[in-house]
Image (cartoon, rainbow, N blue to C red):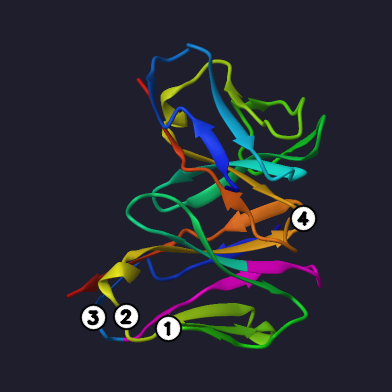
Amino acid sequence: EAQVTQNPRYLITVTGKKLTVTCSQNMNHEYMSWYRQDPGLGLRQIYYSMNVEVTDKGDVPEGYKVSRKEKRNFPLILESPSPNQTSLYFCASSLMPGITEAFFGQGTRLTVV
Amino acid sequence: AQKVTQAQTEISVVEKEDVTLDCVYETRDTTYYLFWYKQPPSGELVFLIRRNSFDEQNEISGRYSWNFQKSTSSFNFTITASQVVDSAVYFCALIRGYKLSFGAGTTVTVRA
C-alpha cells in the first residue's frame, strides 16, 4: 500500500530537548516536504526536498532542520524546541509537485512545554 | 509571493443543503497548480482535486464540483446535497515550482 509514515504520532517534550520526527515514503517519490498546521493559519511549509541531498527552506524554516540522505526518508529535526513549535506536523511526498498530488502522512501532534 | 485566501472560516448547513467554499489565490506566475484537500475529524489530509492554470474546465465528481475562473483568480468548490460525512476542514492550495501554499481552511459542519 502506498503510504507516507510519520513517527511518532504524538509527542510531549520539554523546551530545549532535541527531537526528531521521522517520515518515510514507499512510493519512490523524489519530492518530500514538511508542514505545520496551526489554527487559523492552515498548513505552512517548513522545508522541502527535491531529491536526495537537495533541500530548501519553505515559509517557516526557523528552528527546524531537515536532511535527505535517502530517497525514502525525510526527518524533521528540532534542535532546541520551544513552546511556539507546539503544532500539528505533516510530512508529504509527491512524484512531481503540482503535476501529481501530494500524499500526506497521518500527522504528528507535538507539544513543547 | 503567492497567497491563498479562504474567506469563510466556518460554514454550517443542514443535511441535503448545497454548500460552496470560496478560494481566491494570488500569483504572478502563468504556470501553477491548484488543489483542494479535505481534512476529516480523524485528521488525515485527503486529496480531492488538482487543476493546472491552463485548464479552466469545470469538473464534477459525484456530489462535488469545482469552478475554476482564472479571470477572477478563484477556484471554488461546491458540495451538492451535503451529508454528515462531509463535515471536515477543507483546504485550497496553490503550488508553483516546489513551494506549496495553503489557505487557512474552511470548517464545514453538516447537521443531520
In terms of secondary structure, where does tag 2 sit? Answer: loop
List x then y, in percent, for residue A63: 59, 25
| Image marks 1 and 3: residues in contact by CB distance under 8 Å | no
Name the kind of residue labelled 4 in the image. Met
Q: Work out whether disc 3 and disc 2 sit on a shared chain.
A: yes
Numbered mark located on residue B32 in the image: none
Q: Looking at the picture, do discs 1 and 2 lie on one chain?
A: yes
Dot 2 amino acid type: Ser
Q: Which residue is mark 1?
A: B63
Across and down, in percent, residue A91 comes to 58, 40
Q: Can residue A30 be seen by looking at this rendering?
A: yes
Real-space Cα distance between discs 1 and 2? 8 Å
Q: Position of residue B106 (x, y in %)?
A: 40, 65
Dot 4 falls on a residue whose secondary structure is loop
Which three-letter amino acid code belongs to the residue tagged 1?
Answer: Arg
Alpha-carbon distance for marks 1 and 3? 13 Å
Question: Is residue B36 placed above or below A79 in the rendered structure?
Answer: below
Q: Secondary structure at mark 1?
A: loop
Residue, disc 3: B15
In the picture, measured across the screen, residue A75 lies left or right of residue B28, that is left
Residue located at (71% from left, 52% from top): B99
Question: Neighbour class for label 3 at 10 Å: few (<14), some, many (≥20)?
Answer: some
Q: Which residues are magenta?
A: B18-34
Q: Which mark is residue A96?
A: 4
Which residue is painted at 23% across and 80% down in the image? B15
Q: Which residue is mark 2?
A: B82
